[in-house]
Image: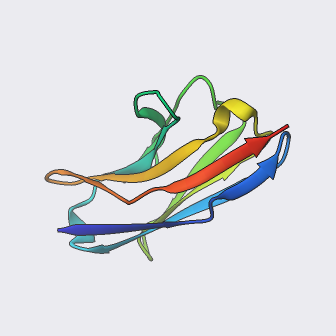
Amino acid sequence: QVQLVESGGGAVQVGGSLRLSCSASGRTFTIYKMGWYRQAPGKERELVATISRDGDTIYADSVSGRFTISRNPTIDTVALQMNSLKPEDTAVYYCYSRAIQDYWGEGTLVTVSS
């Protein structure tokens, strides 16, 4: 089992920045990929960014160039630096890890207002 706890969500104005963090515990040695998904009201959950154990990253086109994902394997955390935020970035952001199975955090709300 892997447990994920997110932090860092909140409210910010257009153009602002936020940093999300996710801490993993439990059988973290089984994790080979971590990342972030988001779900806006009335929409399906979508990929934001992922990072593999080797450091390979994948970004959604909508956030590429504005968001940066990073991982510290020593302390089993993954972070998402979000810059130049837009109203369409408003969503609940979920930490994700892939091990033998997929694990999800409970989510943290990000609200971007104009």
Q: Position of residue 113 (x, y in %)?
A: 79, 41
Q: Quadrant of the N terminus?
A: bottom left
**Residue at 36% across, 51% down:** 96
**Residue at 85% across, 37% down:** 114
Residue 70 higher or lower than 43, as above or below: below
Residue situated in front as seen by the camera: 113 or 74 = 113
Residue 14 higher or lower than 96, as above or below: above
Based on the displayed image, in which of its 4 quarters is residue 61 positioned? top right
Q: Position of residue 72 (x, y in %)?
A: 50, 67
Q: Is residue 83 left or right of residue 101?
A: right
Q: How many numbered circles are shown?
A: 0
**Residue at 83% across, 48% down:** 16
Residue situated in front as seen by the camera: 104 or 30 = 104
The colour scheme applied to this rendered structure is rainbow
Residue 94 in view here: yes
Residue 12 higher or lower than 46, as above or below: below
Q: Position of residue 91 (x, y in %)?
A: 57, 41
Most distant residue in the top direction:
61
Q: Is residue 29 left or right of residue 55?
A: left
Most distant residue in the front direction:
42
Q: Is residue 47 left or right of residue 28?
A: right
Q: Position of residue 94 (x, y in %)?
A: 44, 51
Q: Is residue 9 left or right of residue 27?
A: right
Residue 65 in view here: no
**Residue at 14% across, 53% down:** 100
